[in-house]
Image (tube, rainbow, N blue to C red):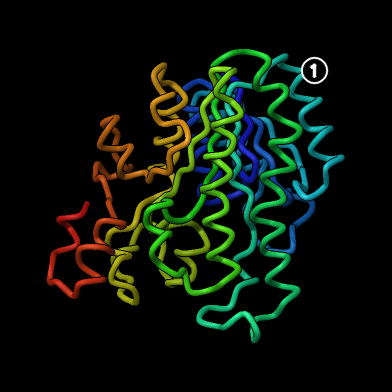
Amino acid sequence: MIALVAGATRGTGRGIAVALGAAGATVYCTGRTTREQRSEMNRPETIEETAELVTAAGGTGIAVQVDHLDPAQVKALVERVDREQGRLDVLVNDIWGAEALWEWTTPVWKHDLDNGLRLLRLAIDTHLITSHHALPLLIRNKGGLVVEVTDGTWDFNATRYRDSIYYDLAKMAVNRLAYAQAQELREHDGAAVALTPGFLRSEVMLEHFGVTEANWREATAHPSFAVSETPAFVGRAVAALATDPGRMRWSGRSVDSGTLAKEYGFTDVDGSRPDVWRYIVEVEETGKQADPADYR
């Protein structure tokens, strides 16, 4: 299996890349931050680290520095994959990097316009640019898979405002990107799926709550954090899709990692199956008293 995880520096992308490595894949891990140069996010995680984790998991990790807003860089990346592998089986569009750009509960007329438009470019344009250049290689063989990583399924987001007009639009648009690509890939027996993790214990989120993976349960600032998941959980969801010969049944759909965990029988690293989306709907939004452990 030859995979390209676009946006693999940290968080969901890293979890997906490593899980595909554990399934034996060769994974091209792209992002902007290397050991020599950081992106505007100024985070310490690097694509080289991700590639090393992929290899340690049993696959072959290849780090490539790419700004996915630059069509020339993406074109060169795909040409390299073609030259070195001759095919592409899995494309994961997980490019994001906009954590510092949105303003919660701020109406559009007060929100910084440049930041909002930059967020949309990072969240949507990058995915389109990458698919434009990568899909001709992916459809060379039947049965390719595209995974569009978002936040919130289509059904969840359709009836809930995500607290920022730019964030709301970005995450709903990515769901639609998967649906649209599913239509275009059908004649090539290819599948496209929108996938959302739950409340992710990413490096950024752990730091935000002042905890580590070792003591994350001590964070009490947000109730649903008790139903959070590691990046490995959504990674295992992608690996399950990638190795399922019947994955066409998911094509065009918008699903969450918890749903796929029930379907395929995988768990998070601690043996649990977090289902934070159900927790939000049944507990947070209703005010019902419930033990978060019942949703893990």
Residue drawn at (24%, 41%) of the image: 271
Residue drawn at (74%, 37%) of the image: 64
Direction from residue 141 to residue 34 in the image, left or right: right
Quarter occupied by residue 103: bottom right
Q: Is residue 85 above or below residue 35?
A: above
Viewer-closest of 179 and 38: 179
Question: So how many labels did they put on this image?
Answer: 1
Identified by mark 1, the residue type is: Arg
Direction from residue 85 to residue 247 in the image, left or right: left
In percent of width and height, residue 70 lies at: 83, 47
Q: Secondary structure at mark 1?
A: helix
Instruction: Report crowding for label 1: few under 14, some 14 to 19, many 20 or more residues within 10 A (C-alpha).
Output: few
Q: Is residue 12 above or below residue 16?
A: below
In percent of width and height, residue 218 lies at: 30, 69
Direction from residue 261 to residue 136 in the image, left or right: right
> In the rendered image, which quarter contains the N terminus?
top right
Q: Which residue is mark 1?
A: 83
Direction from residue 46 to residue 186 in the image, left or right: left
Quarter occupied by residue 47: top right
Quarter occupied by residue 236: top left
In percent of width and height, residue 12 lies at: 51, 48
Viewer-closest of 127 and 65: 127
In percent of width and height, residue 233 lies at: 38, 43
Q: Residue furthest bottom?
A: 110
Residue drawn at (48%, 74%) of the image: 163
Residue drawn at (19%, 62%) of the image: 292
